[in-house]
Image: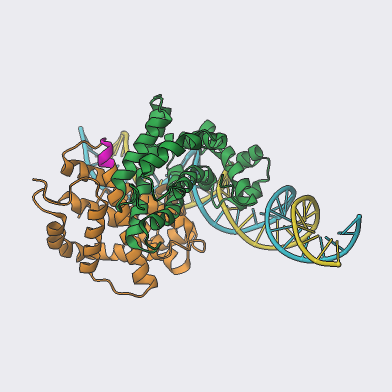
Chain colours: A green, B orange, C yellow, D cyan
Amino acid sequence: MTDGSRLEDARLDVSRHAARLFWEKGFDATSGDDIAAAAGISTRTVWRYFRSKEACVEPVLKVSELRFAALLGQWPKTESIDQFLARSMTAFVSDDAFVRDSIAAVRILAILHREPALRSAWLMACHAAEMELIGVVADRAARTADDFEVRLCAAAITAAMRLVDEEISAAVINGGIHVTSEEATARIISAIRAAATLPICDAVA
Amino acid sequence: MTDGSRLEDARLDVSRHAARLFWEKGFDATSGDDIAAAAGISTRTVWRYFRSKEACVEPVLKVSELRFAALLGQWPKTESIDQFLARSMTAFVSDDAFVRDSIAAVRILAILHREPALRSAWLMACHAAEMELIGVVADRAARTADDFEVRLCAAAITAAMRLVDEEISAAVINGGIHVTSEEATARIISAIRAAATLPICDAVA
DNA sequence: CACTCGCTGTCACTAAGTGACATCTAGTGC
DNA sequence: GCACTAGATGTCACTTAGTGACAGCGAGTG
């Protein structure tokens, strides 16, 4: 599912190591050399891949959001969001690579309050997801991607996804609460329905 | 209006110089030493004020958003957003300090596509505004600040403000289009009305 | 006046990030 | 199979972002 270019895959691999190190040792205590060593590449290549240390986690944060955005891209116009996610979400979350990256992402989100640098990476990842969602919303609303209302709707939905992700992450990691995939799905649906500024959540064709 | 602590004011002053330099010379071509020299302080103090070079513009980006958030904090429950902004916006935008900072912010927003590092600063500033808006929304919706729907509404409204700001900035700077304060106000009202997920835009008392 | 206390400058230092160039590797054409 | 090219990587010297430690300075406060 949605494997990017060879280079992007390499970046994602390094990003996974960076995310693990940030989680285990903290952002400040992890150096570029540490990330390079863990990923088995030279430090120079780390800085070729990423423009800054915090940007090292962007791919792993992005990929979860982008996979969900890509999933929404497959949402048939004849279905409501409830119908679509009810049948597609279980297969989605049983993908192994997805689960591992999600855990890594959730851990990063849970330490956001301690690490301001990581928050900026998270917000950049959400911005990337927002850009992807514009196309999805435009298609579903039968409008163009440069339409302000389309972009507003995409931004609002992205904000909803971001909040749900942050909240679930905090609950799971810091609160020790177990959240089932059904609960998570229900919350994301509810939040997207509330936030969507265009009538795209029910069948549109 | 809303002058923070002495230290915050100093930070804002340095931030103005940084924003001007980033606009004039570009982000990469501006060093920490340049910023320090322009602000008349030592380089060491620059890094005491800001955790990174991109964070140097955060205060100047934040202050416009926070001033607007503070304005919304004064929004009486007996008025609709149209009524309130119609009478308060003109006084708001005629404040000199506000105008100068707004121009600086608008210039930064207009070069966001060239400078990814500055986008992360912008998103962090919007995040700060979102945190402020939570209180405003909670108050107006007669709910608590930890209520998910309150935070969702604040996030959606912040996203709307962000998009309007980005769009107007691009139009003004890159498109050479003149935008009157009435047009800007009308667009922000329309966007906030569309994005708000709780019924706070009309009178609530 | 003495006495904090928080802010700033100086300077030496570490770590983030870049430029330049050699090398390696994966195609691609023959 | 071989030669050729283009893009990715490693090495190393380098610049700039960012920190630690300590000394001074200036505004309260008793």
Quadrant of residue B162 in the image? bottom left
| Percent coordinates x, y for residue A57 in the rendering | 52, 43
- Horizontally, residue A68 falls left or right of residue B86, namely right
| Position of A161 relative to A96 (above/below) | below
- Horizontally, residue B201 falls left or right of residue A183, namely left
Nearer the observer, B113 or A34: B113
On whether residue B149 falls in the magenta region, the answer is yes
- Horizontally, residue B120 falls left or right of residue B131, namely right
| Percent coordinates x, y for residue D20 in the rendering | 50, 38
Nearer the observer, B26 or A4: A4
Nearer the observer, A121 or B9: A121
Total number of numbered discs in the rendering: 0
| Percent coordinates x, y for residue C28 in the rendering | 76, 62
Q: What stretch is highlighted in magenta?
A: B146-151
Magenta: main secondary structure: helix
| Position of D22 relative to C17 (above/below) | above
Let me know if residue A76 appears in the view: yes
On whether residue A163 falls in the magenta region, the answer is no
| Position of D19 relative to A205 (above/below) | above
- Horizontally, residue D8 falls left or right of residue B119, namely right
| Percent coordinates x, y for residue B22 in the rendering | 44, 63
Question: What residue is drawn where x is 21% and y is 64%?
Answer: B186
> In the rendered image, which quarter contains the N terminus of chain A?
top right
Question: What residue is drawn where x is 38% and y is 45%?
Answer: A79
Let me know if residue B67 appears in the view: no
